[in-house]
Image (cartoon, helix red, strand yellow):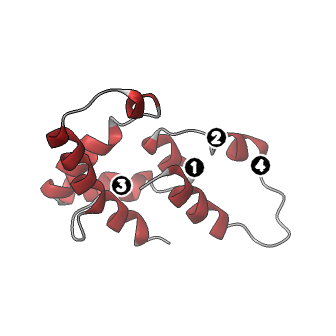
Amino acid sequence: MNRKDLQSLIAKRTLRYDFPDRDLVQGLYTHVPRELLKKADLIDELDAEVAADSQFRANWELVRHWSAESRYNVHSREDADLLVRAVGDSRHGVLAWVKRYW
């Protein structure tokens, strides 16, 4: 999951002649996953999924700590694999969850 995935989700909810709120638009330039989910109005859904699915909760814990700056840090292969799985798991991954709302 990346910033563009959530930005696309938000853009899809914008009607053709809507004039978007300035704060909303500026807020889309963040790489903080929870902040993007707030802009997509998915926080209640996220909290419900975290409460209902322990595997998703573990995946979310990995993803929520990611930052734009962390991509420049040196990570172990194991940590990188864990993050990729947390995002890409087809049943309990963060991207699969976001796609439910696309």
Side of 17 where 55 appears, left or right: left
Instruction: Tell me which label, 1 or 4, sits earlier in the chain.
Output: 4
Q: Earlier in the sequence, mark 2 or mark 4?
A: 4
Q: Which residue is mark 1?
A: 39
The Cα–Cα distance between marks 1 and 4, rounded to whole angstroms, is 11 Å
Circle 2: is it few (<14), some (14-19), or many (20+) Cα within 10 Å? Answer: some
Tell me the SS state at disc 1: helix
* Amino acid carrying mark 3 in the image: Leu
The answer to whether the residue labelled 3 contacts the one labelled 1, judged by CB atoms less than 8 Å apart, is no
Q: Quadrant of the N terminus?
A: bottom left
In x, y percent, where is residue 16?
A: 81, 73
Pointer 1 with pointer 4, Cβ within 8 A: no
Tags 3 and 4 touching, CB below 8 Å = no
- Closer mark to the observer between disc 2 and disc 3: 2
The three-letter code of the residue at mark 2 reads Gly
- 15 horizontally vs 10: left or right: right
Picture residue at 47% right of the left edge, 38% below the top: 32
Find residue 52 and name its label. none
Q: Which mark is residue 46?
A: 3
Where's residue 99, x and y in %? Answer: 42, 70
Residue located at (23% from left, 64% from top): 89
Which secondary structure, mark 4?
A: loop
- Callout 3: SS: helix
Contact? badges 2 and 4 (CB < 8 Å): no
Q: Residue at x 56, y 64 (%)?
A: 9
Q: Is residue 28 above or below residue 45?
A: above
Q: Which residue is mark 2?
A: 27
Q: Is residue 34 above or below residue 73?
A: below
Label 1 vs 2, first from the N-terminus:
2
Q: Which residue is mark 4?
A: 21
